[in-house]
Amino acid sequence: MSWASEELIQKIINYDLNTYYNSNLQEKRSFFKVIPYEVHFKYSSEMISSPLTKISFELQKVAIKIYEELLTYMGDIRGKLKPYEYVKNHLKLVINSTEDLKDEAYVQILKQIKDNSDQ
């Protein structure tokens, strides 16, 4: 007996991250031109000014804080604490949060490992 239905297994096999990105990522603009997600959705040592996914206004500051903890742990921005303290802070913000924030944190990690030259 399988842990999932055949229908669910097929959905997982056929799942495409591009579809997720197109329907869930925030649209980025430069003046009035839309920037394709492939351009802005890759490693950067710069802080984000808004969440990567479409989340409620109330959660946006927390999403940016989650990203700051991630950048600090990765060494992209300087911090005063030891790296594992930033991991703990990151997990505290994410573990008991809403599904939207968990998705945001996951997408942030994907962004930071995509095209990152530092293994």
Image: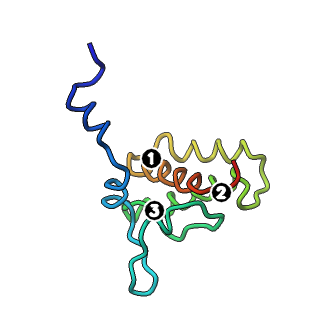
The reply, left or right, for residue 105 in relation to residue 32 is: right
Nearest to viewer (mark 3 / mark 1): 3
The reply, left or right, for residue 50 in relation to residue 74 is: left
What's the distance in space between the residues labelled 2 and 3, CA to CA?
A: 14 Å
In terms of depth relative to the viewer, which is nearer, 112 or 82? 112
Which residue is found at the position 73% from the left and 55% from the top?
Answer: 75
- Secondary structure of residue under mark 3: loop
Instruction: Give the image location of residue 116, x and y in percent.
Output: 63, 55
Give the labeled residue for mark 3: 52
Callouts 2 and 1 close, C-beta under 8 Å = no
Give the labeled residue for mark 2: 71
Q: Kindly identify the amino acid type of the residue bearing the numbered disc 3.
A: Leu
The circle on residue 77 is: none
User: Eyeballing the image, is 104 above or below 27?
Assistant: above
In terms of depth relative to the viewer, which is nearer, 4 or 36? 36
What's the distance in space between the residues labelled 2 and 1, CA to CA?
A: 17 Å
What's the distance in space between the residues labelled 3 and 1, CA to CA?
A: 12 Å
Give the labeled residue for mark 1: 102
Callouts 3 and 1 close, C-beta under 8 Å = no
In terms of depth relative to the viewer, which is nearer, 55 or 113? 113
Instruction: Give the image location of residue 47, x and y in percent.
Output: 61, 67
- Secondary structure of residue under mark 1: helix
Q: Kindly identify the amino acid type of the residue bearing the numbered disc 1.
A: Lys
Q: Kindly identify the amino acid type of the residue bearing the numbered disc 2.
A: Leu
Which mark sits nearer the N-terminus, 2 or 1?
2
